[in-house]
Amino acid sequence: MTAEVEAVFRAEFGRVVASLTARFRDLDLAEEMAQEAFVEALRRWPTQGVPPNPGGWLTVVARNRALDRLRRESTRRSRHEEAEVLTAPEDPGAPVTSVVDERLRLLFTCCHPALAPEARVALTLRLLGGLTVPEVADAFLVPERTMAQRITRAKRKIAAANIPYRVPRDHELPERLSGVLAVVYLVFTEGHLPGSGGAAVRTDLCDEAIRLGRVLRELMPDEEEVAGLLALMLLTDARRRARVDAAGVLVTLDEQDRSLWDRERIAEGHALVRECLRRNRPGHYQLLAAVNAVHTDAPAATDTAWDQVLALYDRLVLATPTPVVALNRAVALAEVAGPEAALAEVERLAGALDGYHPFHATRADLLRRLGRADEAAAAYDRARTLAGNPAEIAFLTRRLDSLT
Protein backbone atom coordinates (compact mmCIF):
# COMPACT_ATOMS: atom_id res chain seq x y z
CA MET A 1 0.00 0.00 0.00
CA THR A 2 2.86 2.40 0.78
CA ALA A 3 4.28 1.80 -2.70
CA GLU A 4 0.86 2.45 -4.23
CA VAL A 5 0.52 5.73 -2.33
CA GLU A 6 4.03 6.73 -3.45
CA ALA A 7 3.03 6.08 -7.07
CA VAL A 8 -0.08 8.22 -6.63
CA PHE A 9 2.08 10.88 -4.98
CA ARG A 10 4.35 11.13 -8.02
CA ALA A 11 1.39 11.26 -10.39
CA GLU A 12 -0.94 13.54 -8.43
CA PHE A 13 1.18 15.86 -6.26
CA GLY A 14 1.56 18.47 -8.99
CA ARG A 15 -2.15 18.33 -9.74
CA VAL A 16 -3.13 18.86 -6.11
CA VAL A 17 -0.64 21.72 -5.60
CA ALA A 18 -1.83 23.38 -8.81
CA SER A 19 -5.47 23.10 -7.80
CA LEU A 20 -4.85 24.60 -4.36
CA THR A 21 -2.63 27.36 -5.74
CA ALA A 22 -5.43 28.34 -8.11
CA ARG A 23 -7.84 28.66 -5.16
CA PHE A 24 -5.65 30.29 -2.53
CA ARG A 25 -2.81 31.95 -4.50
CA ASP A 26 -0.34 30.73 -1.87
CA LEU A 27 2.37 28.27 -2.93
CA ASP A 28 3.46 27.52 0.64
CA LEU A 29 -0.09 26.76 1.76
CA ALA A 30 -0.75 24.65 -1.33
CA GLU A 31 2.42 22.60 -0.85
CA GLU A 32 1.90 22.03 2.87
CA MET A 33 -1.75 21.01 2.53
CA ALA A 34 -0.93 18.67 -0.36
CA GLN A 35 1.62 16.97 1.88
CA GLU A 36 -0.92 16.68 4.69
CA ALA A 37 -3.43 15.12 2.30
CA PHE A 38 -0.93 12.41 1.37
CA VAL A 39 -0.19 11.75 5.05
CA GLU A 40 -3.92 11.29 5.55
CA ALA A 41 -3.99 8.92 2.57
CA LEU A 42 -1.24 6.81 4.15
CA ARG A 43 -3.33 6.63 7.31
CA ARG A 44 -6.71 5.83 5.77
CA TRP A 45 -6.18 4.02 2.48
CA PRO A 46 -4.68 0.83 3.97
CA THR A 47 -7.98 0.16 5.76
CA GLN A 48 -10.48 1.94 3.52
CA GLY A 49 -8.86 1.18 0.16
CA VAL A 50 -7.71 3.55 -2.58
CA PRO A 51 -10.66 5.68 -3.76
CA PRO A 52 -11.77 5.44 -7.41
CA ASN A 53 -10.47 8.95 -8.09
CA PRO A 54 -7.44 9.39 -5.82
CA GLY A 55 -6.58 12.80 -7.29
CA GLY A 56 -10.04 14.15 -6.53
CA TRP A 57 -9.96 12.66 -3.02
CA LEU A 58 -6.58 14.22 -2.28
CA THR A 59 -7.61 17.59 -3.67
CA VAL A 60 -10.74 17.74 -1.51
CA VAL A 61 -8.84 16.70 1.63
CA ALA A 62 -6.08 19.22 0.95
CA ARG A 63 -8.61 21.98 0.24
CA ASN A 64 -10.47 21.29 3.48
CA ARG A 65 -7.21 21.29 5.44
CA ALA A 66 -6.35 24.64 3.86
CA LEU A 67 -9.70 26.12 4.84
CA ASP A 68 -9.24 24.84 8.40
CA ARG A 69 -5.81 26.48 8.52
CA LEU A 70 -7.20 29.80 7.30
CA ARG A 71 -10.06 29.70 9.78
CA ARG A 72 -7.60 29.27 12.63
CA GLU A 73 -5.49 32.23 11.55
CA SER A 74 -7.49 35.31 12.40
CA THR A 75 -4.90 37.58 10.82
CA ARG A 76 -5.77 36.01 7.49
CA ARG A 77 -9.50 36.49 7.85
CA SER A 78 -9.89 38.37 4.59
CA ARG A 79 -8.14 35.58 2.72
CA HIS A 80 -10.33 33.03 4.45
CA GLU A 81 -13.46 34.88 3.34
CA GLU A 82 -12.12 35.07 -0.20
CA ALA A 83 -11.34 31.37 -0.13
CA GLU A 84 -14.89 30.60 1.02
CA VAL A 85 -16.24 32.50 -1.96
CA LEU A 86 -13.95 30.65 -4.34
CA THR A 87 -14.71 27.25 -2.82
CA ALA A 88 -17.76 25.25 -3.81
CA PRO A 89 -18.79 21.86 -2.39
CA GLU A 90 -17.07 19.04 -4.22
CA ASP A 91 -17.69 15.34 -4.54
CA PRO A 92 -14.46 13.43 -3.68
CA GLY A 93 -15.29 10.94 -6.42
CA ALA A 94 -15.83 13.54 -9.12
CA PRO A 95 -13.07 14.42 -11.61
CA VAL A 96 -11.18 17.65 -10.93
CA THR A 97 -12.01 19.17 -14.28
CA SER A 98 -9.92 22.35 -14.02
CA VAL A 99 -6.71 20.65 -12.97
CA VAL A 100 -5.12 20.47 -16.43
CA ASP A 101 -5.17 24.22 -16.96
CA GLU A 102 -4.04 24.82 -13.37
CA ARG A 103 -1.02 22.56 -13.80
CA LEU A 104 0.00 24.51 -16.87
CA ARG A 105 -0.34 27.79 -14.98
CA LEU A 106 1.79 26.42 -12.16
CA LEU A 107 4.47 25.24 -14.59
CA PHE A 108 4.74 28.68 -16.20
CA THR A 109 4.79 30.30 -12.76
CA CYS A 110 7.68 28.06 -11.68
CA CYS A 111 9.57 28.92 -14.85
CA HIS A 112 8.95 32.67 -14.86
CA PRO A 113 11.91 34.59 -16.36
CA ALA A 114 12.11 36.78 -13.23
CA LEU A 115 13.40 33.74 -11.32
CA ALA A 116 16.98 32.53 -11.51
CA PRO A 117 17.42 29.42 -13.72
CA GLU A 118 18.39 27.19 -10.77
CA ALA A 119 15.28 28.37 -8.88
CA ARG A 120 13.07 27.48 -11.85
CA VAL A 121 14.44 23.94 -11.92
CA ALA A 122 14.09 23.53 -8.17
CA LEU A 123 10.48 24.77 -8.07
CA THR A 124 9.49 22.66 -11.06
CA LEU A 125 10.88 19.48 -9.54
CA ARG A 126 9.41 20.26 -6.13
CA LEU A 127 5.92 21.45 -7.03
CA LEU A 128 5.23 19.72 -10.36
CA GLY A 129 7.38 16.64 -9.95
CA GLY A 130 6.62 16.02 -6.31
CA LEU A 131 10.28 15.48 -5.41
CA THR A 132 11.13 16.15 -1.80
CA VAL A 133 13.58 18.93 -0.94
CA PRO A 134 16.33 16.36 -0.17
CA GLU A 135 15.68 14.68 -3.54
CA VAL A 136 15.92 18.01 -5.38
CA ALA A 137 19.12 18.82 -3.46
CA ASP A 138 20.60 15.42 -4.35
CA ALA A 139 19.71 15.93 -8.00
CA PHE A 140 22.00 18.94 -8.22
CA LEU A 141 24.51 17.97 -5.55
CA VAL A 142 23.91 20.86 -3.17
CA PRO A 143 23.20 20.67 0.57
CA GLU A 144 19.56 20.23 1.55
CA ARG A 145 19.62 23.51 3.48
CA THR A 146 20.87 25.37 0.41
CA MET A 147 18.12 23.93 -1.77
CA ALA A 148 15.45 24.67 0.84
CA GLN A 149 16.60 28.29 0.98
CA ARG A 150 16.63 28.49 -2.81
CA ILE A 151 13.05 27.23 -3.04
CA THR A 152 11.90 29.53 -0.24
CA ARG A 153 13.48 32.57 -1.87
CA ALA A 154 11.84 31.70 -5.20
CA LYS A 155 8.40 31.47 -3.58
CA ARG A 156 8.92 34.79 -1.82
CA LYS A 157 9.95 36.43 -5.05
CA ILE A 158 6.80 35.11 -6.76
CA ALA A 159 4.74 36.70 -3.98
CA ALA A 160 6.72 39.95 -3.71
CA ALA A 161 6.91 40.54 -7.47
CA ASN A 162 3.25 39.60 -7.84
CA ILE A 163 4.16 37.13 -10.60
CA PRO A 164 0.86 36.19 -12.22
CA TYR A 165 -0.48 32.68 -11.87
CA ARG A 166 -1.53 32.20 -15.47
CA VAL A 167 -0.56 30.85 -18.86
CA PRO A 168 1.21 33.63 -20.82
CA ARG A 169 -0.71 35.57 -23.44
CA ASP A 170 -0.16 34.66 -27.09
CA HIS A 171 2.53 37.28 -27.68
CA GLU A 172 4.42 36.12 -24.57
CA LEU A 173 4.16 32.40 -25.22
CA PRO A 174 7.17 31.74 -27.51
CA GLU A 175 9.68 33.26 -25.08
CA ARG A 176 8.09 31.81 -21.95
CA LEU A 177 7.57 28.35 -23.44
CA SER A 178 11.22 28.17 -24.47
CA GLY A 179 12.15 28.77 -20.83
CA VAL A 180 9.89 25.98 -19.65
CA LEU A 181 11.29 23.57 -22.22
CA ALA A 182 14.84 24.54 -21.28
CA VAL A 183 14.15 23.69 -17.62
CA VAL A 184 12.72 20.28 -18.49
CA TYR A 185 15.62 19.52 -20.83
CA LEU A 186 18.13 20.63 -18.19
CA VAL A 187 16.62 18.12 -15.78
CA PHE A 188 16.93 15.43 -18.45
CA THR A 189 20.52 16.21 -19.42
CA GLU A 190 21.58 16.24 -15.77
CA GLY A 191 20.10 12.74 -15.49
CA HIS A 192 21.38 11.47 -18.83
CA LEU A 193 24.96 12.59 -18.21
CA PRO A 194 25.43 13.97 -14.67
CA GLY A 195 28.08 16.64 -14.60
CA SER A 196 29.39 15.58 -11.21
CA GLY A 197 28.87 12.99 -8.51
CA GLY A 198 29.41 9.28 -8.59
CA ALA A 199 26.61 8.16 -10.92
CA ALA A 200 27.13 7.57 -14.64
CA VAL A 201 23.38 7.99 -15.26
CA ARG A 202 20.61 9.38 -13.03
CA THR A 203 17.60 7.36 -14.16
CA ASP A 204 15.32 9.11 -11.68
CA LEU A 205 15.96 12.49 -13.29
CA CYS A 206 15.62 11.09 -16.82
CA ASP A 207 12.28 9.51 -15.93
CA GLU A 208 11.05 12.67 -14.20
CA ALA A 209 11.97 14.89 -17.16
CA ILE A 210 10.18 12.56 -19.57
CA ARG A 211 7.14 12.56 -17.27
CA LEU A 212 7.13 16.37 -17.27
CA GLY A 213 7.51 16.28 -21.05
CA ARG A 214 4.42 14.08 -21.28
CA VAL A 215 2.52 16.50 -19.03
CA LEU A 216 3.46 19.38 -21.32
CA ARG A 217 2.50 17.34 -24.36
CA GLU A 218 -0.89 16.60 -22.80
CA LEU A 219 -1.46 20.25 -21.94
CA MET A 220 -0.10 21.81 -25.15
CA PRO A 221 -0.67 19.27 -27.96
CA ASP A 222 -0.44 21.90 -30.71
CA GLU A 223 3.06 23.13 -29.81
CA GLU A 224 5.60 21.52 -32.14
CA GLU A 225 8.58 22.22 -29.88
CA VAL A 226 6.87 20.42 -27.00
CA ALA A 227 6.50 17.34 -29.21
CA GLY A 228 10.09 17.81 -30.37
CA LEU A 229 11.48 17.90 -26.83
CA LEU A 230 9.55 14.81 -25.80
CA ALA A 231 10.76 12.98 -28.92
CA LEU A 232 14.36 14.06 -28.25
CA MET A 233 14.26 12.78 -24.67
CA LEU A 234 12.61 9.48 -25.64
CA LEU A 235 15.08 8.77 -28.45
CA THR A 236 18.07 9.68 -26.29
CA ASP A 237 16.85 7.72 -23.29
CA ALA A 238 16.10 4.70 -25.48
CA ARG A 239 19.86 4.08 -25.63
CA ARG A 240 20.31 4.18 -21.85
CA ARG A 241 21.11 0.49 -21.31
CA ALA A 242 23.83 0.52 -23.99
CA ARG A 243 25.62 3.71 -22.95
CA VAL A 244 27.82 2.32 -20.16
CA ASP A 245 29.58 -1.06 -20.18
CA ALA A 246 29.99 -3.50 -17.30
CA ALA A 247 33.23 -1.80 -16.26
CA GLY A 248 31.50 1.56 -15.96
CA VAL A 249 33.04 3.01 -19.12
CA LEU A 250 31.04 5.18 -21.51
CA VAL A 251 30.25 3.43 -24.81
CA THR A 252 30.16 5.75 -27.81
CA LEU A 253 27.21 5.64 -30.19
CA ASP A 254 29.12 3.81 -32.93
CA GLU A 255 30.11 0.98 -30.55
CA GLN A 256 26.82 0.50 -28.68
CA ASP A 257 24.98 -2.83 -28.72
CA ARG A 258 21.82 -1.74 -30.53
CA SER A 259 19.93 -4.82 -29.39
CA LEU A 260 19.84 -3.17 -25.95
CA TRP A 261 18.02 -0.09 -27.25
CA ASP A 262 14.41 0.38 -26.13
CA ARG A 263 12.44 -0.14 -29.32
CA GLU A 264 9.15 0.97 -27.79
CA ARG A 265 10.57 4.38 -26.91
CA ILE A 266 12.21 4.64 -30.32
CA ALA A 267 8.89 3.96 -32.04
CA GLU A 268 7.16 6.61 -29.94
CA GLY A 269 9.93 9.11 -30.62
CA HIS A 270 9.85 8.44 -34.36
CA ALA A 271 6.07 8.96 -34.42
CA LEU A 272 6.47 12.34 -32.75
CA VAL A 273 9.22 13.34 -35.21
CA ARG A 274 6.99 12.39 -38.14
CA GLU A 275 4.21 14.50 -36.66
CA CYS A 276 6.60 17.47 -36.45
CA LEU A 277 7.73 16.94 -40.03
CA ARG A 278 4.11 17.04 -41.22
CA ARG A 279 3.61 20.39 -39.51
CA ASN A 280 6.82 21.70 -41.13
CA ARG A 281 7.64 24.36 -38.54
CA PRO A 282 11.05 23.13 -37.39
CA GLY A 283 12.58 24.41 -34.18
CA HIS A 284 15.58 23.63 -31.99
CA TYR A 285 14.23 20.55 -30.21
CA GLN A 286 12.52 19.19 -33.30
CA LEU A 287 15.77 19.31 -35.26
CA LEU A 288 17.71 17.62 -32.46
CA ALA A 289 15.00 14.96 -32.27
CA ALA A 290 15.27 14.43 -36.03
CA VAL A 291 19.04 13.92 -35.68
CA ASN A 292 18.41 11.26 -33.05
CA ALA A 293 15.73 9.70 -35.24
CA VAL A 294 18.32 9.23 -38.02
CA HIS A 295 20.74 7.60 -35.57
CA THR A 296 18.13 5.26 -34.06
CA ASP A 297 16.82 4.33 -37.50
CA ALA A 298 20.18 2.82 -38.54
CA PRO A 299 20.45 -0.96 -37.92
CA ALA A 300 24.22 -0.55 -37.49
CA ALA A 301 26.54 2.41 -37.06
CA THR A 302 27.85 1.96 -40.59
CA ASP A 303 24.30 2.41 -41.91
CA THR A 304 23.92 5.90 -40.40
CA ALA A 305 22.81 8.47 -42.98
CA TRP A 306 25.44 11.04 -42.06
CA ASP A 307 24.53 13.29 -44.97
CA GLN A 308 21.05 13.65 -43.43
CA VAL A 309 22.54 14.33 -40.02
CA LEU A 310 24.79 17.03 -41.48
CA ALA A 311 21.87 18.60 -43.34
CA LEU A 312 19.87 18.73 -40.12
CA TYR A 313 22.76 20.38 -38.29
CA ASP A 314 23.07 22.90 -41.13
CA ARG A 315 19.48 23.92 -40.38
CA LEU A 316 20.10 23.82 -36.63
CA VAL A 317 23.06 26.18 -36.93
CA LEU A 318 20.73 28.68 -38.60
CA ALA A 319 18.04 28.21 -35.95
CA THR A 320 20.39 28.11 -32.94
CA PRO A 321 23.78 29.60 -33.90
CA THR A 322 25.73 28.59 -30.79
CA PRO A 323 29.27 27.19 -30.46
CA VAL A 324 27.94 23.91 -29.03
CA VAL A 325 25.69 23.36 -32.05
CA ALA A 326 28.65 24.16 -34.34
CA LEU A 327 30.74 21.60 -32.46
CA ASN A 328 28.11 18.90 -32.94
CA ARG A 329 27.85 19.81 -36.61
CA ALA A 330 31.62 19.28 -36.92
CA VAL A 331 31.20 15.70 -35.67
CA ALA A 332 28.78 15.02 -38.54
CA LEU A 333 31.06 16.85 -40.98
CA ALA A 334 33.92 14.51 -40.05
CA GLU A 335 31.84 11.54 -41.22
CA VAL A 336 30.92 13.20 -44.51
CA ALA A 337 34.00 15.24 -45.47
CA GLY A 338 36.67 13.65 -43.27
CA PRO A 339 38.41 14.54 -39.99
CA GLU A 340 40.67 17.21 -41.49
CA ALA A 341 37.76 19.37 -42.65
CA ALA A 342 36.04 18.87 -39.30
CA LEU A 343 39.15 19.75 -37.31
CA ALA A 344 39.41 23.10 -39.10
CA GLU A 345 35.85 23.89 -37.96
CA VAL A 346 36.55 22.75 -34.41
CA GLU A 347 39.70 24.84 -34.06
CA ARG A 348 37.66 27.97 -34.75
CA LEU A 349 35.62 27.26 -31.61
CA ALA A 350 38.57 27.12 -29.20
CA GLY A 351 38.03 30.56 -27.75
CA ALA A 352 34.36 29.96 -26.97
CA LEU A 353 34.60 26.37 -25.73
CA ASP A 354 37.97 26.04 -24.01
CA GLY A 355 36.32 25.14 -20.69
CA TYR A 356 33.86 22.68 -22.28
CA HIS A 357 35.17 19.13 -22.06
CA PRO A 358 33.26 17.77 -25.13
CA PHE A 359 35.18 20.31 -27.22
CA HIS A 360 38.51 18.82 -26.18
CA ALA A 361 37.20 15.25 -26.49
CA THR A 362 35.97 15.94 -30.04
CA ARG A 363 39.22 17.62 -30.99
CA ALA A 364 41.20 14.71 -29.50
CA ASP A 365 39.24 12.18 -31.53
CA LEU A 366 39.82 14.07 -34.77
CA LEU A 367 43.54 14.39 -34.04
CA ARG A 368 43.70 10.66 -33.26
CA ARG A 369 42.05 9.83 -36.57
CA LEU A 370 44.59 12.04 -38.35
CA GLY A 371 47.50 10.20 -36.70
CA ARG A 372 48.58 13.18 -34.57
CA ALA A 373 48.97 11.08 -31.44
CA ASP A 374 50.84 13.52 -29.20
CA GLU A 375 48.35 16.33 -29.79
CA ALA A 376 45.46 13.91 -29.36
CA ALA A 377 46.86 12.71 -26.02
CA ALA A 378 47.13 16.28 -24.74
CA ALA A 379 43.55 16.99 -25.81
CA TYR A 380 42.24 13.80 -24.19
CA ASP A 381 44.05 14.74 -20.98
CA ARG A 382 42.50 18.21 -21.02
CA ALA A 383 39.03 16.73 -21.60
CA ARG A 384 39.52 14.27 -18.74
CA THR A 385 40.53 17.10 -16.40
CA LEU A 386 37.34 19.01 -17.19
CA ALA A 387 34.93 16.05 -17.20
CA GLY A 388 32.92 15.23 -14.09
CA ASN A 389 31.00 12.11 -15.11
CA PRO A 390 32.76 8.88 -14.03
CA ALA A 391 31.82 6.95 -17.18
CA GLU A 392 33.18 9.74 -19.38
CA ILE A 393 36.37 9.99 -17.32
CA ALA A 394 36.89 6.23 -17.66
CA PHE A 395 36.33 6.43 -21.43
CA LEU A 396 38.75 9.33 -21.87
CA THR A 397 41.34 7.56 -19.72
CA ARG A 398 41.06 4.45 -21.89
CA ARG A 399 41.53 6.51 -25.06
CA LEU A 400 44.50 8.31 -23.55
CA ASP A 401 46.12 5.07 -22.45
CA SER A 402 45.70 3.67 -25.96
CA LEU A 403 47.79 6.55 -27.29
CA THR A 404 50.49 6.69 -24.60
Image: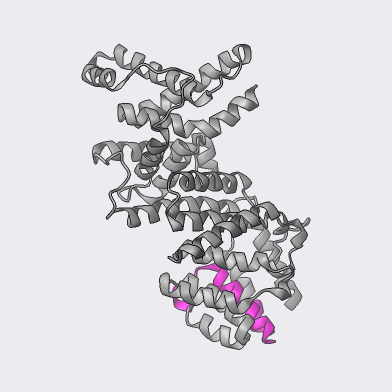
Q: Is residue 247 left or right of residue 331?
A: right
Q: Residue at x 57, y 84 (%)?
A: 343
Q: Residue at x 51, y 74 (%)?
A: 313
The answer to whether residue 47 is above or below residue 240 is above
Return the residue nearer the eye: 199 or 43: 43
Which image quadrant: the N terminus? Answer: top right
Q: Residue at x 61, y 54 (%)?
A: 268
Q: Residue at x 46, y 26 (%)?
A: 95
Q: Position of residue 113 (x, y in %)?
A: 32, 51
The answer to whether residue 326 is above or below residue 102 is below
**Residue at far front of view:** 278
Which image quadrant: the C terminus? Answer: bottom right
Return the residue nearer the eye: 309 or 323: 309
Q: Is residue 262 left or right of residue 189?
A: right
Q: Position of residue 264 (x, y in %)?
A: 68, 52
Return the residue nearer the eye: 138 or 165: 165
**Residue at far left of view:** 78
Dominant SS in magenta: helix
Does the magenta run of residues contain 187?
no
The answer to whether residue 11 is above or below residue 216 is above
Q: Position of residue 120 (x, y in %)?
A: 40, 46
Can residue 280 be spotted in the picture?
A: yes
Q: Position of residue 13 (x, y in %)?
A: 49, 31
The answer to whether residue 308 is above or below residue 262 is below
Q: Quadrant of residue 109?
A: top left
Q: How many marks?
A: 0
Can residue 195 be spotted in the picture?
A: no
Does the magenta run of residues contain 358?
yes
The residue segment tinted magenta is 350-378
